[in-house]
Amino acid sequence: MDPAWDKFRRRQRAFWFAILLCPPWFAFGSLLYYFLARFELNYDLFFILIVALPALGNIMVAHWRKFFWPCPNCGRPFHATWFYGNLMARQCVHCGLRKWAPVKAKTIKSISLDQWNPVADEYFD
Ligand SMILES: [Zn+2]
């Protein structure tokens, strides 16, 4: 698969990891809440601040990182314009590049090491 999509793949995995991490995190927080409730104090705020907000914040950040991921072809957000957003978009909402399609390298910065042509270096020695 094209290496230009590696960052998107990482962000997508981070998003799903944040989703999957939520139930065990809440289970752990509930267990902790249960043990702390023995002291007969109100720990609702503890549960919200220590358990719920970090878990939901993690999902929110992962979502936004995936949502505003820059298209490898045009550099603008792949899934969003200023008035429209579609996280399930199958092509870039700006340039129409299809998801997972190979991208032509435009600058030297976008060439990965496995695409580097060492023969071209001989002309500069
Ligand atoms: Zn694009």
Image (cartoon, helix red, strand yellow):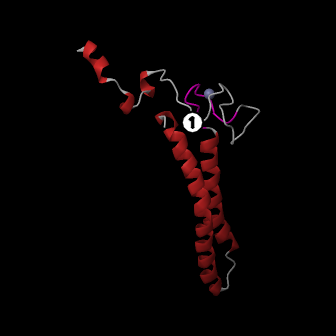
The residues colored magenta run: 69-80
Residue 76 among those drawn in magenta: yes
Q: Quadrant of ligand 1?
A: top right
Query: In this picture, is 86 found above or below 122?
Result: below
Res 59 seen here: yes
- Of residues 64 and 106, the one nearer the viewer is 106
Task: Tell me the residue that label 1 is attached to.
Answer: 100
| Residue 72 located left or right of residue 30 | left
Residue 60 x/y as whole percent = 65, 51
Res 54 seen here: no
Q: Residue at x 37, y 32 (%)?
A: 114
Residue 26 among those drawn in magenta: no
Image label count: 1
Q: Residue at x 60, y 49 (%)?
A: 62
Q: Does mark 1's beta carbon lie closer than 8 Å to ligand 1?
A: no
Q: Secondary structure at mark 1?
A: loop
Q: Residue at x 49, y 40 (%)?
A: 6
- At label 1, the amino acid type is Trp
Disc 1: CA contacts within 10 A as few (<14), some (14-19) or many (>=20): some
* Quarter that holds the C terminus: top left
Query: In this picture, is 43 found above or below 102?
Result: below
